[in-house]
Image (spheres, grey):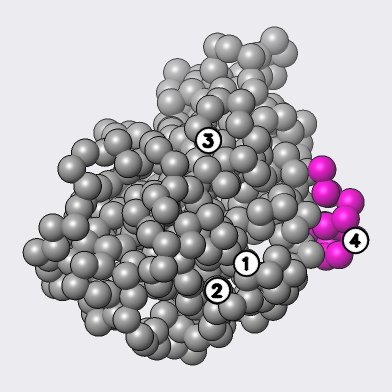
């Protein structure tokens, strides 16, 4: 569990703000050293808070948003019109933000002590670009987040608790904004004007074609969500599927859906952890589960896959990732995805290299996830009243921020989306060209 005592530790951001405040009180920080020391158009000298925020905005590279304070001051730093405005309700909120920005921005937005008017994903994108750009002036923000927060465990029991917090919120909640496919992973948009549901179907076809599924084969899926991919593979590719999941809510939905469509015999949904997969399979697939496995458990996952794959076997892992190793945003880890850690490609090799799997193909669908999230956010906003009635205003704001922040993270490249196709070492049952990716199902 997260140790809340860490939130009381002084951070570099808090110490810097305090130092700037002392200089401002002593008169050593003024119009010459702080951009916009006087409120534009009024001649009125800014407060200490206004001057400090002006300096932070300058450190962010002059982002295209404004900040409005509780005392009526508004700080802008870009020459172009702002795309949004961050409203800070109190000095207390600003100090909390200074002490631990990675966690407290989400906490304060959820409670309404910070609000964002205008383009929420755009404002968050501007913050990410300013704070994390290569050679930027605020690299210590990453170091701060790593020092203050610890991710939760992904042991057998820890994984069940983590999954329960996120996925067992109720199938009706997810049904409000995921669409009929109930697919909670990155879609694949074959054309710019494809709908969300068409793109989710295209994603499932893309995965099945990469695996070259053939009629009569047996596929095992680790972390099957609401069962859409398993059902699609059985219906359209003629395979039998064993799909593992530890979310009871999701499995109940998946089983009812398979039964209603007459595929109860071809698809078996198993309530169990991926570590307990047994049997022998022609193909392995995992879409959207690796983020919850934990880097320390990759060798064990690789061992499971090696144990259950046939000598001609092949597998595919679809996961949110990073360009380099770094932890999950602490607010997302605490409030939305406990235990989550998107890997870099180098970290993913801990699954494949010890078992001598041959990596056959790597594809990055980052911008497809940005589009998927944009569609989800639009559906979520359309279901605002229903979500509010089911939960409360804090929950609505929390999930809005999560979706909008994820859009910004994929836009800026803070997050990636990897599909890695692999096979058993020495197997020559591999395609000669990549043409198979863009054709129809192999029967």
Q: Residues within 10 Å of mark 1 (few under 14, many from 20)?
A: many
Dot 3 alpha-carbon crowd within 10 angstroms: few under 14, some 14 to 19, many 20 or more:
many
Residue drawn where x is 83% and y is 65% of the image:
391
**In the depicted structure, whether residue 21 falls above or below residue 68:** below
State the mark number for residue 189. 3
Label 3 with label 4: CB-CB less than 8 Å: no
**Horizontal arrangement in the rendering, residue 90 relative to residue 136 (left or right):** right
Residue corresponding to mark 4:
389
Q: Nearer the viewer, residue 127 or 171?
A: 171
Q: Which mark is residue 226?
A: 1
Query: Which element carries disc 1, helix, strand or loop?
Result: loop
Extent of the magenta region:
382-395
Mark 2 and mark 1 residues within 8 Å of each other at the beta carbon: no
Image quadrant assignment for residue 131: top left
* Residue position marked by numbered label 2 in the rendering: 266
Q: Position of residue 266 (x, y in %)?
A: 55, 73
Ranked by sequence position, the earlier of labels 1 and 3 is: 3
Q: Secondary structure at mark 4?
A: helix
Which percent across, then down, holds residue 24? 51, 35
Q: Residue furthest left?
A: 426
- State the residue at coordinates (54%, 83%): 270
Pointer 3 or 2: first along the chain: 3
How far apart are the two marked residues, 4 and 2, measured between alpha carbons?
A: 38 Å
CA gap, disc 2 and disc 1 = 16 Å
**Label 4 to label 1: alpha-carbon separation:** 24 Å
Q: Earlier in the sequence, mark 4 or mark 2?
A: 2
């Amino acid at each position: 569990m997260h140790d809340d005592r860490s939130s009381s530790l002084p951070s570099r951001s808090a110490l810097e703000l305090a130092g700037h405040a002392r200089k401002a009180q002593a008169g050593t920080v003024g119009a010459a050293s702080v951009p916009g020391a006087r409120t534009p158009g009024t001649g009125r000298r800014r407060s200490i808070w206004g001057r400090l925020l002006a300096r932070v905005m300058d450190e962010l590279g002059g982002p295209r948003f404004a900040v409005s304070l509780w005392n009526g001051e508004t700080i802008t730093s870009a020459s172009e019109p702002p795309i949004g405005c961050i409203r800070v309700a109190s000095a207390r909120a600003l100090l909390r933000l200074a002490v631990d920005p990675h966690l407290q921005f989400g906490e304060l937005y959820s409670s309404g002590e910070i609000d964002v008017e205008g383009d929420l994903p755009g404002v968050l994108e501007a913050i990410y670009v300013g704070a994390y750009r290569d050679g930027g002036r605020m690299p210590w923000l990453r170091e701060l987040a790593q020092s203050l927060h610890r991710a939760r465990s992904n042991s057998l029991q820890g994984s069940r608790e983590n999954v329960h917090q996120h996925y067992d919120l109720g199938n009706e909640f997810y049904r409000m904004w995921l669409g009929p496919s109930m697919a909670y992973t990155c879609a694949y948009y074959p054309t710019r004007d494809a709908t969300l549901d068409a793109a989710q179907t295209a994603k499932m076809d893309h995965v099945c074609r990469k695996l070259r599924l053939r009629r009569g084969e047996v596929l095992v899926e680790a972390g099957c969500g609401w069962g859409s991919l398993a059902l699609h593979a059985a219906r359209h590719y003629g395979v039998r599927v064993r799909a593992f999941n530890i979310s009871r809510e999701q499995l109940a939905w998946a089983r009812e859906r398979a039964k209603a469509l007459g595929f109860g015999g071809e698809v078996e949904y198993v309530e169990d952890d991926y570590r307990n997969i047994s049997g022998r399979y022609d193909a392995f697939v995992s879409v959207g589960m690796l983020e919850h496995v934990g880097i320390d458990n990759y060798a064990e996952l690789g061992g499971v896959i090696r144990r259950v794959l046939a000598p001609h076997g092949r597998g595919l892992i679809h996961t949110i990732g990073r360009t380099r190793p770094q932890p999950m945003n602490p607010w997302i880890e605490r409030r939305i995805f406990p235990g989550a850690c998107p890997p870099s490609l180098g970290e993913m090799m801990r699954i494949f290299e010890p078992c001598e799997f041959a990596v056959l193909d790597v594809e990055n669908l980052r911008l497809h996830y940005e589009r998927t999230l944009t569609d989800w956010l639009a559906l979520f906003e359309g279901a605002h009243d229903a979500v509010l009635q089911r939960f409360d205003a804090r929950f609505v704001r929390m999930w809005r921020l999560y979706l909008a922040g994820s859009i910004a993270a994929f836009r800026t490249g803070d997050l990636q989306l990897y599909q890695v196709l692999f096979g058993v070492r020495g197997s020559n049952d591999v395609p000669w060209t990549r043409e198979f990716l863009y054709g129809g199902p192999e029967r």
